């Protein structure tokens, strides 16, 4: 390994010899001086070279200086290189108050002169060349924020004695329904499916006596949707806990988790997010507002919007309307919508004995659903009847129903889409912008 210094360390170093590596962002080749902006994964620095031009009058021209000038003049955007030179501190330099006078320049890999995308390229074009698109400081920050967000959530869970699991993504039967499934015709005796969620395996962990578990992992939906918030492969954040009294126990855990993770992001990246995205990360106050679905529909109607859905659920505009109400009334970005009718919930959601409604919720963040959570039904005879109501054949669910034939504690949990949280936190228009490599109905590359 070389004595490479990261750009964000330069400010704290004394003037003198230094070595940095990165890619060329811009080149300004002036008559008497050359400037190069070199960027690495931590920031950008200005390189300076007093240009030495060929001259017929000069008798003893410095061949090395001429070669360096020629090399810098020919640099193309995106070229990866290493520079050794003299670090100088100068507050007049707008880029960090430091610059490096180039002594030696070694090209690791030259880039083609014509860059295939520009700042005004379409999203699809940028996705075609995602590895170049991600070089932007703004895009780099997205994944630093994602790292901090996930680490903070893991820390929250680990400090509270949760167990992290890694459930299989190949399943012998569907996790929720026969819809939106990717089939995998690999196994000799039957068709396998890519997991829509770790739902069944999260519940199995409760029956196994794990008590509290979490998982951050891929999930797959064969959903031919082209909206800004859907993907065929996405990262799902899941948790499940035992010995709960209702879905309220799950909701309380999740709101604490989110507030903790948002605080971590605000502390570490708040200033840079404000600079690059024009967004102030707001750490949500606890508790989050709760509104029953029936009441939410009444509020939306009173605001002048007629929800066209006939199943009793909110549509996207209805979600935006209720979020606007919550922002105006509570000054909050989050709201739990609770008490869903069984017809619009999975068969394994527990139902309230008095109301007949499910003990479940959706969590909306800035008008977009990011989570479904619930208390699960743990009585096998009830599960069988509820599965039949949904048109599911209990025989096809035997492996799942077996979990509950040998004792199961009252339990519940949630699943949350990571990309949606990032999209809404940073004010982006699509999950494509906050997904490292997006997968949708028409995209399988790069």
Image (spheres, grey):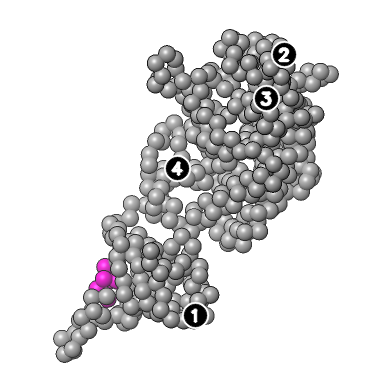
Residue 382: which disc?
Answer: 2
Secondary element at tag 4: loop
Distance from disc 4 to disc 1, alpha carbons, whole Å, reads: 40 Å
Tell me the SS state at disc 3.
Answer: helix
In space, the residues marked 2 and 4 are separated at their CA atoms by 41 Å
Front residue of 11 and 48: 11
The location of residue 288, given as percent across then percent down, is: 76, 42
Dot 3 or dot 2: first in sequence order is 3
The magenta-colored residue range is 69-74
Q: Is residue 297 above or below residue 111?
A: above
Residue topped by disc 3:
207
Predominant SS of the magenta segment: helix
Residue 433 rendering spot, x and y as whole percentages: 50, 46
The residue mark sitting in front, 2 or 4, is 2
Residue at (59% x, 13% y) in the render: 398
| Residue holding disc 4 | 437
Q: Quadrant of residue 338?
A: top right
Number of numbered tags placed on the structure image: 4
In whole angstroms, how far apart are the C-alphas of marks 1 and 2? 71 Å
Q: Earlier in the sequence, mark 1 or mark 2?
A: 1
Residue at x-position 50% and y-position 29%:
169
* Front residue of this view, candidates 402 and 313: 402
Residue 382 in view (yes/no): yes
Tag 3 and tag 4, C-beta contact below 8 Å: no
Q: Quadrant of the N terminus?
A: bottom left
């Amino acid at each position: 390994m070389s004595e490479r210094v990261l750009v964000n360390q330069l400010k704290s170093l004394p003037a003198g010899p230094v070595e940095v590596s990165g890619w060329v962002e811009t080149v300004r080749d002036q008559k008497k001086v050359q400037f190069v902006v070199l960027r690495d994964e931590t920031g950008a620095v200005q390189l300076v070279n007093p240009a030495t031009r060929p001259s017929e009058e000069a008798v003893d021209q410095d061949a090395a200086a001429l070669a360096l000038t020629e090399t810098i003049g020919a640099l193309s955007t995106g070229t990866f290189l290493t520079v050794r030179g003299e670090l100088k501190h100068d507050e007049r330099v707008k880029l960090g108050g430091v610059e490096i006078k180039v002594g030696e320049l070694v090209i690791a890999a030259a880039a083609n002169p014509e860059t295939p995308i520009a700042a005004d390229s379409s999203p699809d074009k940028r996705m075609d060349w995602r590895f170049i698109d991600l070089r932007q400081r703004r895009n780099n920050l997205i994944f630093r924020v994602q790292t901090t967000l996930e680490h903070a959530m893991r820390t929250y869970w680990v400090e509270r004695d949760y167990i992290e699991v890694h459930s299989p993504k190949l399943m012998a039967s569907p996790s929720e329904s026969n819809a939106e499934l990717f089939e995998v015709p690999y196994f000799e005796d039957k068709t396998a499916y890519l997991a829509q969620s770790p739902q069944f395996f999260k519940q199995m962990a409760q029956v196994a006596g794990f008590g509290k578990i979490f998982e951050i992992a891929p999930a797959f939906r064969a959903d031919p949707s082209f909206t800004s918030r859907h993907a065929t492969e996405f990262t799902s954040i899941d948790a499940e806990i035992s010995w709960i009294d209702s879905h309220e126990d799950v909701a309380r855990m999740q709101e604490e988790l989110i507030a903790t993770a948002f605080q971590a992001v605000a502390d570490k990246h708040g200033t840079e997010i404000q600079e690059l995205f024009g967004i102030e990360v707001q750490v949500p106050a606890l508790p989050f507002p709760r509104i029953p679905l029936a009441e939410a529909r009444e509020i939306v109607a009173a605001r002048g919007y007629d929800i066209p859905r006939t199943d009793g659920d909110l549509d996207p505009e209805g979600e935006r309307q209720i979020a606007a109400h919550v922002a105006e009334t509570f000054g909050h970005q989050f709201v739990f919508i609770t008490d869903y009718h069984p017809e619009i919930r999975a068969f394994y959601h527990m139902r309230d004995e008095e109301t007949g409604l499910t003990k479940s919720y959706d969590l909306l963040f800035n008008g977009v659903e990011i989570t479904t959570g619930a208390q699960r039904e743990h009585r096998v005879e009830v599960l069988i009847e509820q599965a039949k109501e949904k048109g599911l054949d209990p025989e096809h669910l035997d492996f799942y129903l077996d979990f509950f034939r040998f004792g199961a504690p009252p339990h519940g949990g949630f699943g949350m889409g990571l990309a949606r949280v990032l999209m809404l936190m940073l004010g982006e228009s699509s999950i494509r912008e906050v997904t490292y490599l997006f997968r949708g109905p028409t995209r399988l590359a790069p």
